[in-house]
Every structure is written in C-alpha cells, then in structure tokens.
Amino acid sequence: MKFINYLQSITGVSVYPLTSLLLFTIFFTVASIWAFKADKGMVDHVSRIPLDHDDSQSL
C-alpha cells in the first residue's frame, strides 16, 4: 500500500499543509522583523561569542 493511500484515509488532511505553511510564514516574518530591528551592538556581541575566550564579559 502506498503512502498516499494512508493520507487519503485521514479526514481533513488538507488542513495540515495549510497550517504548517501559515506557521512557517508567521515565524519567518517575526524572525525577519526582529533581525532588522535588533540592536546592532547586541548582534555584534552575539556574533563574536564563539570567538571570545573570556567568559567574564556580559551584555
């Protein structure tokens, strides 16, 4: 039996792709807005974390 046959037997299966697309779009939009509005100093600090060997620094 093919996988498509399992999907056809689920009632309302067409809602799942639409819901996942909607959730992805909302998440991507919020992440993009945050990235453009984020404080540049904080972004610079976070980008240097893997390279810093001094653990005493804080935001």
Image (tube, rainbow, N blue to C red):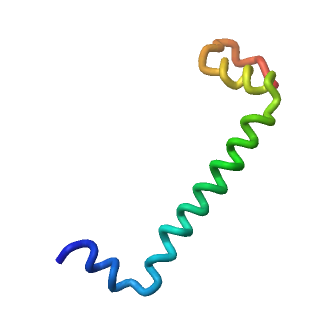
Q: Is residue 36 left or right of residue 28?
A: right
What residue do we see at 66% from left, 18% from top?
A: 48
Residue 41 location (% of width, % of height): 81, 22
Instruction: Count how many numbered circles sit on residues in the image.
Output: 0
The quarter holding residue 46 reads: top right
Residue reaching furthest to the left: 1
Left or right: 37 as drawn, with respect to 47: right
Q: Front-most of 39 and 14?
A: 14
Residue 16 at what x, y percent from top left? 49, 72
**Quarter of the rendering containing residue 43:** top right
For the residue pair 23 and 54, the one nearer the viewer reads as 23
Image side of residue 41 versus residue 27, left or right: right
Tell me what residue is drawn at x 29 percent, y 79 percent: 6
Which residue is located at x 72 percent, y 36 percent? 35
Q: Residue at x 17, y 77 (%)?
A: 1
Viewed as shown, does residue 17 lie left or right of 5?
Answer: right
Image quarter of the C terminus:
top right
Relative to 12, say whether 43 is above or below. Answer: above
**Quarter of the view holding residue 4:** bottom left
Residue 32 in the image, given as x and y percentages of width and height: 69, 42
Q: Is residue 27 above or below residue 51?
A: below
